[in-house]
Image (tube, coloured by chain):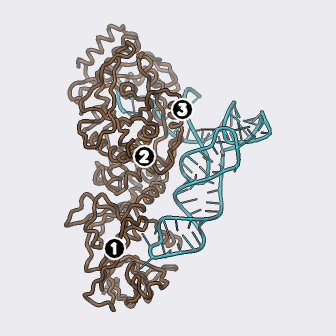
Chain colours: A brown, B cyan
Amino acid sequence: MSTDSAPAAPAAPSDFIRDIVAQHVAEGKYARIHTRFPPEPNGYLHIGHAKSICLNFGIAREFGGICNLRMDDTNPTKEDIEYVESIEEDVEWLISGWARDKYGLKPKGKLPEAQSVNGKPDFHSPAVVGQTHENSTLEPFYASDYFDQICEYAFTLIKKGKAYVCDLSPADTDAYRGAPDKPGKDSPWRNRSIEENLDLFTRMKNGEFPDGARTLRAKIDMAAPNVWLRDPLLYRIRHTAHHHTGEKWCIYPMYDFAHCLSDYIEGITHSICTLEFEVHRPLYDWILESLDLPRALPKQYEFAKLIPSHMIVSKRKLIQLVNEKVVTGWSDPRLPTISGIRRRGVTAEALRNFAIGVGVTKYISTTDIAVYEHAVREDLNRRALRRMGVLRPLKVVITNYPAGQVEELDAVNNPEDETAGKRKVPFSREVYIERDDFAEVPAPKFFRLKPGGEVRLKYAYIIKCDEVVKDAAGNITELCCTADLDSKTGGATAGRKIKGTIHWVSAAHAVDAEVRLYDRLFSESEPEKDGRDFKTALNPNSLEVVTAKLEPSLKEAKPELRYQFERLAYFCLDQDSTAERLVFNRTITLKDTWAKEVKKS
RNA sequence: UGCGCGAUGGUGUAACGGUAGCACAAGUGACUCUGAAUCACUUUGUCUAGGUUCAAAUCCUAGUCGCGCAGCCA
């Protein structure tokens, strides 16, 4: 067993789907548990998909199974190769170090194998698992790789008298379908002969008819109470090139027809999807059962998708935010896309902990963004290197400290992790402190720096504010302080009881950096509540850019590491960062009890 | 007035006939060279009404409320 699947620290999750799987394993119902994650490549993956990925891959790793990545690409008009690539990248990132060895892929270009099972013809597309990221000979599964087989199944259905070519226009098809409380009417083309259906479907496939002229429909029951059983469409005509199959096809299977068959072809045992597909399940079963297939049939199970507060997770609206340039792109750190979350500095482990922690039920609920933020902080607190950085600098001159003198002070890298060691931080006569850490007129219980008051500069000296220097307009430009020169960490008076300790950066040694202060994209918990325009709920302060003064060690910051600027927030290096111009993203602030206190009064 | 699904503190989620627990949030205190983290404590819940049972969140009946479904989208 690889380290990828070593028992995770949190207890194995339990939910109604895992209960079902566990029972199937106990019964020996399947040779192996096989799930799949089947996104349509028509947008970027988001936090909701993360839940689905964690569920499907989680089941694979807990029950010794496999989880395939499959592009559910049956609608060429909406899909794009850009999305295929981003999906692969995001899935890899989320599962690496966790379920990478359960990742079901297939050799590049490989199509389903024709085989014979118990004397019956069959198609199968087996998975290859446990390949490394570098292995470029593998690729995800594509529903579009099964178009030949799906088409063959369509002919089988026609021959069994279970499908027919219908000439109704789109509008008439709608009208004939009836309403939820009113039965539909049979299509006038419903009773064509098998021969005619075979001929017509062949000609559809050959491109003899224009878009929308005809469809292939399942022959079930136009009076069925479940509208999805009222002779649902199986195939439609689309003279459109496909990102994966090119110009080969002008007919494309509908989701309901393609999905169950794709699951079957891949040997999926548990086809897990969201609640809105619940009413499709009888159709899923009908198609598979109508085909007299030789292998075990997959079964569909539904769960409630993740709805986080203060976020938008509808692909259509995400696209809108991107297209209207409300954000900078799909990977804007304010977006709940997996690529945005990654760029923001959230680790895969933190996202997973959240996505698993929310649980799996059939109850539609909104998950408080605080739960997500807690998962992010919990993870970053453990791993982030502590550094000092001043976002809004206020110069402090320590008048009794010799000009030109520099001390290299010891600073702890991570109090949560002794092995992270220490570093040196330079101290000198002039330092920057946070403007918020000084108050000329302090609020009650304010225990940072104030006129005549004392505060400790972390790892350095206790200083006292003697004078507040202002410009002509009355703005504070500088503070003159004196240090207790015996109070340095380890010094004679270092133990003095001083309530406040603040961070600082030596002015002469400070490194300027662009720091992007990200906040929630929406200020309302439910941006779409009561059908209002979600853009009215946008947080105008979701991004603020400042030029910060950072301690010099941050020049060596690495993109794979995480940093806590002490007392402020967690940060990571942005992809825009260069040696000349450092750029940091604020992942999330530290909890701020003081801000809450101020707000109360 | 069709079919399907659901309902446990403020928000999520467990308990599978036998003490309603956990997380987040909120609050109080301790500690603190991060107003962070950590630790301790506290507040708040089984949709309603009947029934079965020694015992019901759980089983039964009826109701209430909410969500999904009428794309040639997935």
Identity, as a three-letter code, of the amino acid under mark 3: Gln
Q: CA distance from mark 2 to mark 1?
A: 41 Å
Closest to the camera, between mark 2 and mark 3, is 2
Residue A227 or A80: which is nearer the viewer? A80
Taking the image as shown, residue A203 lies to the left or right of residue A522, namely left
Q: Earlier in the sequence, mark 2 or mark 3?
A: 2
Quadrant of the rendered image containing residue A346: bottom left
Identity, as a three-letter code, of the amino acid under mark 1: Val
- Location of mark 3 (residue): A23
Q: Chain of mark 2?
A: A
When the figure is inspected, residue A187 is found, relative to residue A528, above or below; the finding is above
Mark yes or no: residue A216 visible.
yes
Q: Do the numbered discs 2 and 1 sit on residues whose CB atoms are within 8 Å?
A: no
Q: CA distance from mark 2 to mark 3?
A: 23 Å
Q: CA distance from mark 1 to mark 3?
A: 56 Å
Identity, as a three-letter code, of the amino acid under mark 2: Ala
Q: Chain of mark 1?
A: A
- Labels 2 and 1 in the same subunit: yes
Q: Do the numbered discs 1 and 3 sit on residues whose CB atoms are within 8 Å?
A: no
The x and y percentages for residue A144 are 29, 28
When the figure is inspected, residue A226 is found, relative to residue A410, above or below; the finding is above
Q: Which mark is residue A6?
A: 2
Q: Which mark is residue A205?
A: none
Closest to the camera, between mark 2 and mark 1, is 2
Residue A585 or A551: which is nearer the viewer? A551
- Labels 1 and 3 in the same subunit: yes
Q: Residue at x 27, y 75 (%)?
A: A510
**Callout 2 secondary element:** loop
When the figure is inspected, residue A405 is found, relative to residue A303, above or below; the finding is below
Image quadrant containing the N terminus of chain A: top left
Q: Which mark is residue A390?
A: 1
The x and y percentages for residue A165 are 34, 15
